[in-house]
Image: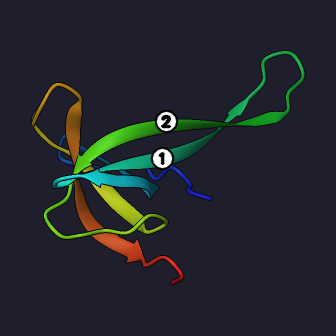
Amino acid sequence: MAEEKKKTQGNMMTKTGVVVSNKMEKTVVVAVENLVKHGMYQKYIKRTSKFLAHADNALNIGDRVLIVETRPLSKRKRWAVREVVEKAAS
């Protein structure tokens, strides 16, 4: 499970998530989970957001990564992988 990690370093937002796809060149899809409280029932619900992130090095599915907000690199790609927090179990 990936927890969302919101930190601001200047104007750059960072999030922690799990790589769910690496089929593109220099791009990975990172799923970030967030807990949201239901308005009526007051239970916590998991919400998952997917972000396209630029990655120069090869990453595997299941790797936990830290992504940082960048300038627009393409139509949907506005994040870049800063570091690999945890490698996937092989």
Up-down: is 29 above or below 71? below
Of the image marks 2 and 1, the number of the one nearer the N terminus: 1
Q: Residue flagged by tag 1: what amino acid is it?
A: Ala
**Disc 2 and disc 1 in contact, CB within 8 angstroms:** yes
Q: Position of residue 60 (x, y in %)?
A: 38, 69
Q: What's the CA distance linking mark 2 and mark 1?
A: 6 Å
Q: Residue at x 20, y 36 (%)?
A: 78
Q: Residues within 10 Å of mark 1 (few under 14, many from 20)?
A: many
Which numbered disc covers residue 15?
A: none
Q: Position of residue 40 (x, y in %)?
A: 86, 15
Q: Residues within 10 Å of mark 2 (few under 14, many from 20)?
A: few
Q: Dot 2 lies on which element?
A: strand
Q: Position of residue 44 (x, y in %)?
A: 78, 37
In the rendered structure, the answer to whether residue 63 lies left or right of residue 8 reads right
Say which of 61 and 40 sits in front. 61
Specify whether residue 26 is in view: yes
Q: Residue at x 33, y 72 (%)?
A: 84
Up-down: is 41 above or below 87? above
Quadrant containing the N terminus in the rendered view: bottom right
For label 1, the residue is 31
For label 2, the residue is 49
